[in-house]
Image: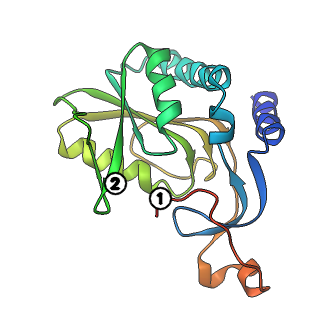
């Protein structure tokens, strides 16, 4: 397990997708570490390989999935590849007036078993919003998967959660950020705002 996680970190480094600096995350928090999974997922072979590894965890745990749902933008590619790996349809949510919604004719049937797929989990806010929208539609979230879990497994979604890389990465509220206090300005390499 540790060797596999180190291999994934190396993949992020090789693709310049593991960044160090002063970042404002989509959650609004600040961090000195940023995972830009899109730089890896732009390569279909890598995206497929990562999805296969995540799909293996779902299969090993005998979790039945009818549909994969991902929050746009970060989860779209890995969600699509998860759908392919599991042989189910893959759709995504989008923000409409600040609320997670299904658009483009996407729908969820009542009682469908849904796997929520993310690229990187930091606070879990986007994932929780997707789960809430699924609950409102009458669907059942059966598990959550992500390539990276920056919370080191501390976030509880009320369903099984699997990640390929789980580690604790420091993040700070803006007014408590030591980098801001030292005079550094944050950059937003990826944002939902």
Percent x, y of residue 175 = 61, 85
The circle on residue 95 is: 2
Q: How is the image coloured?
A: rainbow
Q: Position of residue 120 (x, y in %)?
A: 58, 46
> What residue is drawn where x is 50% and y is 16%?
85
Instruction: Assess disc 1: are there few (<14), some (14-19) or many (≥20) residues with their C-alpha within 10 Å of its C-alpha.
Output: some
Quarter of the N terminus within the rendering:
top right
The disc label shown at residue 192, or none: 1
SS at circle 2: strand
Q: Is residue 153 left or right of residue 63?
A: right
Q: Give how far apart the Cα atoms at labels 1 and 2 are.
A: 9 Å
- Residue 168, given in percent of the width and then of the height, sits at 69, 54
The answer to whether 116 appears left or right of 182 in the picture is left
Q: Residue at x 33, y 30 (%)?
A: 114
Dot 2 alpha-carbon crowd within 10 angstroms: few under 14, some 14 to 19, many 20 or more: some
Q: Position of residue 31 (x, y in %)?
A: 69, 66
Residue 11 found in image quarter: top right
Residue reaching furthest to the top: 87
Circles 1 and 2 in contact, beta carbons < 8 Å: yes
For the point 70% across and 63% down, the residue is 170
């Amino acid at each position: 397990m540790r060797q596999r996680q180190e291999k994934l970190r190396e993949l992020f480094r090789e693709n310049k997708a593991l960044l160090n600096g002063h970042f404002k995350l989509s959650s609004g928090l600040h961090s000195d570490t940023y995972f830009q999974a899109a730089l890896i997922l732009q390569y279909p072979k890598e995206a497929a390989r990562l999805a296969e590894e995540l799909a293996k965890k779902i299969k090993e745990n005998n979790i039945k999935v009818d549909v994969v749902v991902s929050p746009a933008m970060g989860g779209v590619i890995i969600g699509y590849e998860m759908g392919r790996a599991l042989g189910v349809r893959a759709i995504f949510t989008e923000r409409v007036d600040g609320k997670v919604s299904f658009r483009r004719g996407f729908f969820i049937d009542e009682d469908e078993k849904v796997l929520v797929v993310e690229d990187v989990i930091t606070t879990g806010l986007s994932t929780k919003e997707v789960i809430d929208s699924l609950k409102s539609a009458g669907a059942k979230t059966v598990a959550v998967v992500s390539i990276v879990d920056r919370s080191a497994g501390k976030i509880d979604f009320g369903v099984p959660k699997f990640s390929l890389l789980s580690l604790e990465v420091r993040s700070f509220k803006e007014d408590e950020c030591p980098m801001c206090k030292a005079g550094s300005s944050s950059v937003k390499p990826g944002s939902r705002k």
